[in-house]
Image (tube, helix red, strand yellow):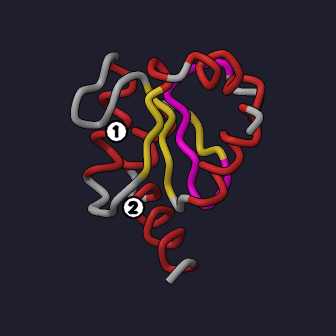
Amino acid sequence: MDVMDRIRQQVEENPVVIFMKGTPQFPMCGFSSRAAEALKRCEQEFAYVNVLADPEVFQNLPRFADWPTFPQIYIDGELVGGCDITLEMFENGELKKAVEEAYAKRA
């Protein structure tokens, strides 16, 4: 499967997915760590892709949604953004609401 198709599949099949450096349990950068922690605090499961373990995804994800940095968080098939946007959404309650709505649509 083409790398762009693999990325698209992850985004479409998971209500919430974070493309990050490392894993939620063992993040490999501060931005990924903070974004994953915000998602954890929403108290819903979420998928993740360790871009360091997949060089093709690492190289091509910035082209997928025209977003140059990592992490990238997708909710309900849409790019939310990176660490700063995710933390801002968490702080004002929008992240938890968006995550809950994404799961409710798939229930």
What's the residue at 66%, 15% (across, down)? 59
Which residue is nearer to you in this view: 1 or 5?
1
Residue 68 image offset from top left, x and y in percent: 67, 19
> Which residues make up the magenta segment?
68-78
What's the residue at 35%, 24% (across, down)? 22
Find out whether residue 72 is within the magenta segment. Answer: yes
> Is 72 placed above or below 15 here?
above
- In this image, 58 relative to 39: left or right? right
- In this image, 24 relative to 63: left or right? left
Residue 33 image offset from top left, x and y in percent: 30, 28
* Amino acid type, mark 1: Ala
Q: Quadrant of residue 67?
A: top right
> Is 20 placed above or below 59 here?
below
Q: Are marks 1 and 2 in contact (CB under 8 Å)?
A: no
| Secondary structure found at label 1 | helix
What's the residue at 51%, 34% (across, down)? 19
Residue 96 image label: 2
How many numbered marks have been drawn onto this rendered protein structure?
Answer: 2
Which residue is nearer to you in this view: 15 or 67?
15
Q: Residues within 10 Å of mark 1 (few under 14, many from 20)?
A: many
* Amino acid type, mark 2: Lys
> Is 71 placed above or below 1 here?
above
Farthest-out residue, bottom? 107
Residue 36 image label: 1
The quadrant in which the N terminus is found is: top right
